[in-house]
Image (spheres, rainbow, N blue to C red):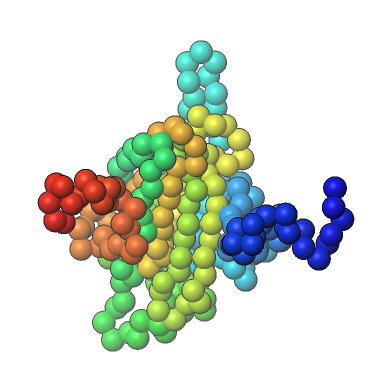
Amino acid sequence: MSDSSDNLWHGLRPETAAILETRDYSVSDLAGRLATTGIPAGNLINQEEKLSDVWIPGVKFLSRQVYQQPHRGFFGEFSREGEGVLGEMGMWPKQWASATMTGGSAKGFHIHPPFIPDGEEPAAWLRRLFLEEPTNFSLRQYDKEQWDAMFFVQGRLEMLLVDERAGMERRTMRFLIDGDNIPGPNNVGIVIPAGVAHALRSADSSDLIMVYGTSTRFNPDFEGRIESRVEAAPLPSDWQGYFGSE
């Protein structure tokens, strides 16, 4: 075996060596991985203050207990009105829905417009809400903007968040959540503020079942999309050419 450290790959054809890449196996700290490669969602419970330099303001995680019932299935709670994280925030969904994603599929990025009161400058208003007075929940007008509160009954997924609100630092969060059929610390719920783009994709071969509540009733005007072509399932180019122009 050659000991040449100057050119480890000199045994390959030059054109192949020129395009060769190797994987970086170094591990960054928790904050670095949250903003880049991602971490298990269970690691984020009660970590908002510790990870404040990378945390997207307004995002909340809810720890959930899932009870396995041998030979029958499982039971898990999400939240009780007026209690826990949602109770503290003063938000309770006006509409509940479910969605199923087949294994290997993806959804998003979705984004909902933040409400800005008349006479308020957007950046200043949002900084006041989330940076200057983050616990003054009475300022928030949940009934005029869509917040999402969600959990997952089945499957394993990767979720990505991007803060796109005016006046806020553009931060990213990336994490893995397990459905109730995979019991463990990653059975979490998440609350996503208006103005934070969110996408998710299945992380294994099983179908993904999501349950989510929204602070407003469904309003198609609130449903923005960013780079969501992954949802379109486009035909192969030769099929599209035969079938007809797009």
Q: Position of residue 194 (x, y in %)?
A: 37, 64
The quarter holding residue 225 reads bottom left
Residue appearing at x 52%, y 65% in the figure: 172
Who's the residue at 62% across and 64% down the image?
18
User: Observer-nearest residue: 83 or 210?
Assistant: 210
Q: Is residue 226 above or below residue 178?
A: below
Q: Do we see residue 135 in this rendering?
A: no
Quarter assignment of residue 10? bottom right
- Tell me: 194 left or right of 85: left
Report the front residue among 11 and 35.
11
Q: Closer to the camera, 106 or 20?
A: 20
- Give the number of marks: 0
Q: State the quadrant of the C terminus.
A: bottom left
Whether residue 184 appears in this view of the structure is yes
Residue 35 placement (x, y as % from top left) = 58, 63
Q: Residue at x 26, y 82 (%)?
A: 118
* Horizontal side of residue 17 vs 141, given as left or right: right
Q: Residue furthest top?
A: 71
91 up-or-down from 74: above or below: below
Direction from residue 177 to residue 208 in the image, left or right: left
Given residues 238 and 55, the one toward you in this image is 238
Residue at 40% x, 79% y is 166
